[in-house]
Amino acid sequence: MENEDLLKRITMNPDICFGKPTIRNMRYPVELILDLLSGGMTNEEILADYPDLEEKDIFAALDFAARLMRVNSVSRVLAA
């Protein structure tokens, strides 16, 4: 599947999850998928816990995050 096709799985709707990027207009924010992966869950574990998701949704979340990181500069944000 081409990356452009994957990105079609990422939707932003102001009526769903406060407009955050979600998977296919479902209440699964991209950040949830990324948090699960960074916490060590495998694709198979995520799909078992969230049966509405497909493996392509996980790839779409990763591609979306990768594209967000392609920025010209990064500023340091200090915690309060």
Image: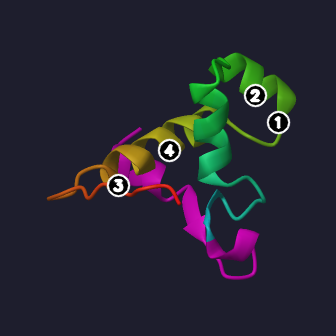
Res 17 quadrant in image:
bottom right
Q: Along the horizontal axis of the image, is 40 left or right of 68? A: right
In three-dimensional space, the C-alpha distance between marks 1 and 4, rounded to whole angstroms, equals 16 Å
Residue at horizontal 53 percent and vertical 60 percent from the top = 80
Q: Secondary structure at mark 3?
A: helix
Q: Which mark is residue 17?
A: none
Q: Which mark is residue 68?
A: 3
The residue that disc 2 covers is 47
Mark 1: secondary structure: loop
Can you say whether 4 is above or below 49 in the image?
A: below
Q: Is residue 67 above or below residue 40?
A: below
Q: CA distance from mark 1 to mark 3?
A: 25 Å
Q: Residue furthest bottom?
A: 14
The image shows residue 68 at horizontal and vertical percentages of: 35, 55
Residue occupied by mark 1: 50
* Alpha-carbon span between mark 4 and mark 3: 12 Å
Q: Amino acid at mark 1?
A: Tyr
Q: What residue is disc 4 on?
A: 60
**Whole-Å distance between the Cαs marked 3 and 2?**
24 Å
Q: Few, some or many C-alpha atoms within 10 Å of disc 4 (few <14, some 14-19, many ≥20)?
A: many
